[in-house]
Amino acid sequence: MTKLEQRRKEMVTSVMREGIYEAVVEVLTEHGLDGLTMDRVAAQAGVGKASLYKYFANKQEMLRFVHAKAIEPVTAAVQTHLKSDIPADQKLRAILRTWFEHLGEHQVLFNLFCNDFGVEGLLKSEELTEQERALQDISNVLEEGVRSSVFRKVDTARTSLLIFGAVRQLVEQQLANDETWPTDELTEHVMDFFSRGLQVR
Amino acid sequence: MTKLEQRRKEMVTSVMREGIYEAVVEVLTEHGLDGLTMDRVAAQAGVGKASLYKYFANKQEMLRFVHAKAIEPVTAAVQTHLKSDIPADQKLRAILRTWFEHLGEHQVLFNLFCNDFGVEGLLKSEELTEQERALQDISNVLEEGVRSSVFRKVDTARTSLLIFGAVRQLVEQQLANDETWPTDELTEHVMDFFSRGLQVR
Amino acid sequence: MTKLEQRRKEMVTSVMREGIYEAVVEVLTEHGLDGLTMDRVAAQAGVGKASLYKYFANKQEMLRFVHAKAIEPVTAAVQTHLKSDIPADQKLRAILRTWFEHLGEHQVLFNLFCNDFGVEGLLKSEELTEQERALQDISNVLEEGVRSSVFRKVDTARTSLLIFGAVRQLVEQQLANDETWPTDELTEHVMDFFSRGLQVR
Amino acid sequence: MTKLEQRRKEMVTSVMREGIYEAVVEVLTEHGLDGLTMDRVAAQAGVGKASLYKYFANKQEMLRFVHAKAIEPVTAAVQTHLKSDIPADQKLRAILRTWFEHLGEHQVLFNLFCNDFGVEGLLKSEELTEQERALQDISNVLEEGVRSSVFRKVDTARTSLLIFGAVRQLVEQQLANDETWPTDELTEHVMDFFSRGLQVR
DNA sequence: CATGAATGAGAATTCATTCAT
DNA sequence: AATGAATGAATTCTCATTCAT
């Protein structure tokens, strides 16, 4: 009984948090990060303002949850690719495609993902920023590629910055212009560019 | 007389606006974007708070001015390079170096430059974002390079996004970690990478 | 049956109210008067928050009950002494000792007892404050003492104020400094002072 | 000019703070410490709520000011008596009279004076509570009196507690009942009692 | 019947903007 | 013409009380 009740409670909590999550996304989309007030979130979620505080200790915790939830599927997919047994260049391609796929969907989430800038103080300083994690993922793939001679010898740290930055910019661009480019084509384009550079021939 | 008075007024206005500009930069540096209150700006500038409204219609206008002014020298330098009579790859190199030089100096200005995100609503949507201008500059150089066979045939629009994003990320990284990498080395490294890509050989 | 049920209900009510009483004391001790929220009381008592309202009309009523219950044993003991068949000075001594004994135990209860200030609006204005009852008790003893020539002729009303105030202060002092002075010594000291005053000789 | 302006500003500030002080007293009188909201103070003072924060950093600072201002004249008068060149018993009498005079005026201020309890966190912990200062003052007088054989040998620390507590109670009583007893008579009565105690003869 | 979820009413605090001097 | 004082409108967060299950 107690167990059942507890499970039910967890379910309810979970459902509420998801509802709030969606409300936050909605408000973020409509009013931007600065316009994200607890009042608006409550209104959007269709609950009293005080109720938000039943599910999150404070605004920051709420944002942390949203951030985590938004990022989760991307991170998971990327980790899967990382562990798979394919050549480094295929891994890189897979990761890029994952990003383009997921990030292209929600402008808001993308901003949360990349511009940890605007969300300064959002994350517990101990934990890795999503950006940092992403950078490390690429870095690892690059190193693997260099070791296996799939890539030439490059400064993996900096190169991962270059790649991440490029992807970020492409996604931002799409969102800014409200366009959606075909994921595959995008992936190939980027892979092609990073493979061959600008060099003639 | 009327003319003279008008000119004097313009001078005064101009001087005041510059003073305010510096105050804003100072406050931004010290307290961040969230800590940028009109009170602090006025105090830093050494003028009355109400006076700020003599020179700018409101906070947003003030920020627009600061943004424009911060970007100005970079834009100017880049324009010079663009018009100079050197091969496209040299132009690209020159532009990159300019960015690394200027953007590396002030974190604050950099953020204003790139993260129009955090300053959403800052810019009149009609006018070109600095980012857009920068992208167009690169795009032009790329086109020129393709035409003159200095670069292989690439999608110049997208490639300029790639390049811009990469540079942006590098600068952000430096700032986030409070490091400063040698401009020349950085430029060469990036140029090298963009030229040859990851391809073995 | 109806009678039985009613009696059972009364029992249950009584037990619950005592449980809540203890919870309140616990919360008061741990979080102070400002930290006394219905949530905490419910949690501490191990009942649902709404249940509190089954046993008390509202927070104020609950506090009234706590107050009364906290005072009860002191009052009872004092009444016993009052009725006993000993000289007035012995009675006074006995009352003082009772106070020192009981009040010294729980800071929280003491505050409820004396500082009706902080709990303004707590007590129905009609009913006698505990303080008033105490004052009257002393006053009675003093009168008795004066009548029986154990004490000199004094203004009993005012003198009881003096005595009560002194005791109160002594107890407060102990609590404020987290000290505990021996009850006996304390009693004797006060009795001594009030008996002989400051007069030399 | 600057000096003049500064002086004017100080005057204005001072006047405003006094106005706010009176508003606070008014609100305290009417609604008690719990009912003391910034809203009410602002309304009572006839200024906007935000203005309060121009004159006090926060509610606590405001209360500190009120406390200090309320206490100031009493403290000053007492210090004068302490330094004067009269026998200890006269000093004690003078101090008591001062208290009765000043404290009898405003219930609210009296509570601030004595019940530092309810105002926990109000005072910077470093500084002496008014109560502590008062206690020390009496203690000093008692010691002086004992040294000069004006008083018999008593435990000055505890005796000062007794005396202070007694006075406090008397004042509280008056206020609770909205009475005002003649200061002189009150003083004499208390002094008489403290001198001779309850002892017959 | 017991209860936890929900919330309205309010609390302190902040800040861009206006205006009287 | 310059300015500091004033403030309305928000913002985050809290809690006694109610009500549907």
Image (cartoon, coloured by chain):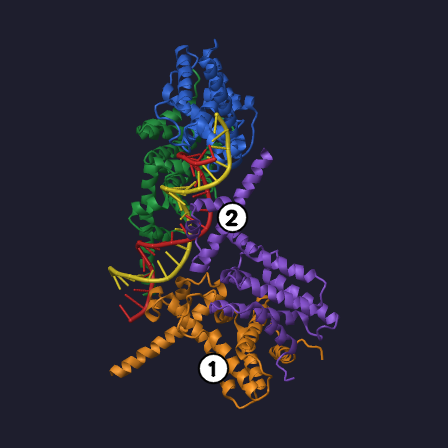
Chain colours: A green, B blue, C orange, D purple, E red, F yellow
Q: In which quarter of the image is residue C122?
A: bottom left
**Residue flagged by tag 1: what amino acid is it?**
Ala
Q: In the figure, A129 relative to D73: above or below?
A: above
Q: Where is residue B97 in the image (x, y as percent from the top left)?
A: 51, 20
Residue toward you, C6 or C164: C164
What is the quadrant of the N terminus of chain C in the image?
bottom left
x and y, in percent, of residue D165 in the image: 58, 70
Residue B14: where, in percent of width, then height?
49, 21
Q: Which of marks 2 and 1 is in front?
A: 2
Q: Residue at x 48, y 56 (%)?
A: D25
**Tag of residue C47:** none
Percent position of residue B127, x then y: 37, 22
Subunit of label 1: C
Residue D182 as seen in the image, left or right of residue A9: right
Q: Residue, x 42% and y 48% (percent of image)?
A: D46
Q: Which mark is residue C76?
A: 1
For this orientation, the residue located farthest to the top is B85
Q: Mark 2 points at which residue?
A: D17
Structural crowding at the residue carrying mark 2, measured as other residues with C-alpha within 10 Å and reported as few (<14), some (14–19) or many (≥20): many
Q: Is residue C162 left or right of residue A185?
A: right
Mark 1: few, some, or many residues within 10 Å (few <14, many ≥20)? few
Q: Mark 1 falls on what kind of element?
A: helix
Task: Name the residue: 67% across, 66% down.
Answer: D91
Is there CB contact under 8 Å for labels 2 and 1?
Answer: no
In this view, B171 is above or below F16 = above
Q: In which quarter of the image is residue D26?
A: bottom left
How far, Cα to Cα, is label 2 from label 1? 50 Å
Q: Are marks 2 and 1 on the same chain?
A: no
